[in-house]
Image: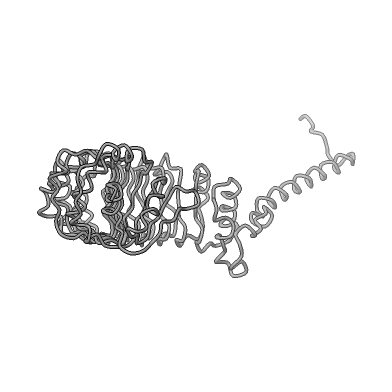
Amino acid sequence: MNVAVLLLLGLGLLEAEGRCFFNRTQEHCVCYNLSEESVNSIIQCLAATVVEFRGGELERYVAFPISDLDPSTIEMLGSLIIRKVIFGDLLVPEILLARVLRFFSYTHVQELVFESCIFEGRGNWDEMAGQDLPILSLHFHNVTSAPLMGHEQDFSSLSSWLETLQELAVTGSHVTSLPCGIGSMFRALHSLDMAQNSLEDESLMPAFCKGAFPRLQVLSLQRNNLKSYHSVCESVQLLPELQQLDLSQNKLMADTSSSCQWPVSLQVFNLSNTGLDEVLTPLPPGLEVLDMSCNHLHAVDISLSSLKKLFLSQNMLQTPPSIRNYPVLDTLHLDNNLITELPGDEVKLLGHLQDVAVAGNPYNCSCSGAGGLQALAGMGHLGQGWPHDYTCHSPPHYQGRLVQDVPVSVLRCNSAAVVAPLCIALTLLGLAGAVCLLRSRPGLIQPCRRV
């Protein structure tokens, strides 16, 4: 059997009859439960840039003899344009994976993905010692494997490759801890996604110990079991280049005496859907993007001089935060709060922003309430939600009506501005008429006499 076919057998598993299918652009090829008899179907995928293998078991191929590749096979692998390989719904013996992973060094594959896979046993990774791979992005989603604790030696054998890895995602896989020794091997990693796992406050400090992930810029801890805002802050303090942090969908609690200082490099902070009923402090001072949507905030009274984008949709705000506290703000989202009216002075400031969203609020469509929104819409700042997502909640005769349809003429909304000048004009006109009448009757106005 051809060595290249053996490699595909080992990596793509051919267990039951199946076929491969291209997408319309011929760039993505998906293979389902292929057998050795349908190898030709696998070979047609070699023209794709993304190859996906779904279904089967690899246990039967553990004993396959996999020797070094001959020069013609190495040349063939080097000519492939495959950039991404996906394995899904598989039982993967680690011993087999350890034996075939080194062959990726002859390819141009940059992204490797495992979805809904079970890793079984323990592989011998000694053959990977000093081996470089072109893979820069590694993703695991909904995978089952042995705990990472105690596998530091395995990672050490992979260090030549791991030191060049740039993106790592381990999501939805019940991870409870990351040993400190493992993090120190990812010296070039700039993005780490640990969303939808079982990390707790106590497990973060060892994970991000001194020397771990020294180049990390983007960190997602979304939907774990984190509770202490202060503990998270202390855990990431040693990440000197951290720019983006996602803590959304954790149930965070405020610490009464938190003096922790976030990394000064932090610019994007996601605290959405974290159960907040007040703004947690301290916040990173250099923030440019802050997302606190989907919480229970009643007020937002903070000042951030560098903030450019503020997302506060789906809270319980009755008034918008003061724009004066954010001198460089260009985006503000306040959808689905309890705001009934935008104050006149804030409307003028909102008019200087590029993106304003305040749909789904229970608006009082009085003259000032409807007028402010119509003014913003006229300046093109209310985006896609206008006009259908802006409806009146009061007064009763406007309830359910679109805000854009409420009349806000000067005569109806500010009659004093019209009536007062009119009254003054009429009074002056009357006085002028009286003077003219008196002057038209000689003798009625006597000239002054000298004494």
Tell me residue 385's x, y (percent): 54, 56
User: Along the horizontal axis of the image, is 385 left or right of 304?
Assistant: right
Tell me residue 401's x, y (percent): 61, 65
Residue for point 79% across, 33% down? 448
Tell me residue 423's x, y (percent): 72, 50
Quadrant that contains the C terminus: top right
Q: Quadrant of residue 72?
A: top left
User: Along the horizontal axis of the image, is 261 left or right of 243?
Assistant: left
Q: Residue furthest top?
A: 450
Residue 173 appears in the rendering: no
Image: 164 above or below 194? above
Q: How many marks?
A: 0
How is the rendered protein coloured?
one colour
Nearer to the camera, 157 or 339: 157
Nearer to the camera, 446 or 412: 412
Q: Residue furthest bottom?
A: 396
Residue for point 36% across, 64% down? 17
Image: 186 above or below 31? above
Tell me residue 217's x, y (percent): 28, 42
Residue 14 appears in the rendering: yes
User: Along the horizontal axis of the image, is 65 left or right of 31?
Assistant: left
Q: Quadrant of residue 434?
A: top right
Nearer to the camera, 112 or 344: 112
Residue for point 46% across, 61% down? 336
